[in-house]
């Protein structure tokens, strides 16, 4: 069973691997209200910006922890199979996770209702691009800058993946949504291995630890200043 579920998860992960980077071609020119003056607006209120991201991460961490505990409980043993009510509760908890995540990373321009994180996962390895929204959304631009910080910040220890956690989170969401719609045993095998630490371990290594490092107030520059630098880089990439 362990071998079969591992193969199932590997196959599903392969299907979700990004094919390439860079969706910046869609942005024709850097919006002046975002990019003029080196994006100086981004650190106008450094304390408020830091507080907003700290609160957003705290909420996401709480929502994800609550979901992962319920998820692990539902697939505690090979015999466990959540009923319709338990599956519905997991889906609702996952939607809470996604709502909280949307306060941290740029999901407004996901562009695909069936696979809302598809294009973001595709872009991350090549550098999170400038959010292509009209009119430009400063909050979403800051969230893109935060994700760039999160995926590039140096963390001691084993090398981490930029997309593994987000891909596994999205895989979990899709498999839960597809429960009862065919492919039952294969989906259940994948959900079981995700519930058995695969999702939580990826969260800790790829998202939680980097986020805490980015939010750490021990940096010699403020979070807002670092986000401003990332916004300026995104503007330069659009220009270039």
Image (tube, rainbow, N blue to C red):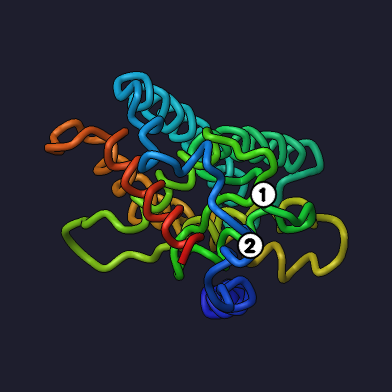
Measured as percent of width and height from the top left, residue 8 is found at: 62, 76
What numbered label is drawn on residue 119? Answer: 2
Residue at 44% across, 63% down = 127
What numbered label is drawn on residue 151? Answer: none
Compared with residue 70, is residue 176 higher up or lower down, i.e. above or below?
Answer: below
Which one is nearer the viewer's eye here, 212 or 135? 135
Measured as percent of width and height from the top left, residue 14 is found at: 58, 78
Quarter of the image that includes the N terminus:
bottom right
Q: Residues within 10 Å of mark 2 (few under 14, many from 20)?
A: many
Residue at 44% across, 34% down = 61
Q: Are marks 1 and 2 in contact (CB under 8 Å)?
A: yes
Question: How many angstroms separate mark 1 from mark 2 (CA)?
Answer: 9 Å
Which one is nearer the viewer's eye here, 108 or 54? 108
Compared with residue 192, is residue 209 higher up or lower down, i.e. above or below?
Answer: above
Measured as percent of width and height from the top left, residue 194 is found at: 54, 59
Residue at 36% across, 19% down = 48
Would residue 228 be found to the left or right of residue 194 on screen?
left
């Amino acid at each position: 069973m362990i071998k079969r579920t591992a193969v199932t998860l590997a196959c599903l992960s392969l299907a979700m691997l990004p094919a390439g980077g860079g969706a910046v071609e869609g942005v024709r020119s850097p919006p002046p209200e975002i990019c003029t003056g080196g994006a100086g607006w981004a650190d106008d209120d450094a304390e408020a910006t830091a507080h907003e991201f700290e609160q957003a991460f705290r909420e996401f961490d709480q929502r994800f922890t609550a979901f992962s505990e319920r998820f692990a409980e539902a697939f505690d043993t090979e015999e466990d199979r959540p009923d319709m009510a338990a599956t519905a509760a997991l889906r609702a908890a996952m939607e809470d996770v996604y709502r909280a995540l949307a306060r941290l990373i740029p999901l407004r321009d996901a562009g695909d209702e069936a696979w809302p994180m598809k294009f973001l996962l595709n872009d991350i390895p090549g550098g999170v691009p400038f959010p292509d929204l009209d009119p430009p959304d400063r909050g979403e631009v800051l969230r893109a800058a935060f994700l760039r910080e999160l995926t590039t910040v140096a963390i001691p220890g084993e090398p981490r993946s930029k997309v593994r956690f987000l891909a596994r989170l999205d895989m979990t969401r899709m498999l839960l949504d597809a429960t009862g719609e065919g492919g039952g045993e294969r989906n259940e095998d994948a959900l079981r291995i995700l519930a058995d630490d695969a999702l939580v371990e990826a969260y800790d290594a790829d998202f939680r630890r980097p986020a805490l490092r980015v939010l750490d107030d021990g940096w010699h520059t403020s979070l807002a200043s670092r986000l401003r630098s990332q916004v300026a880089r995104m503007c330069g990439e659009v220009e270039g």
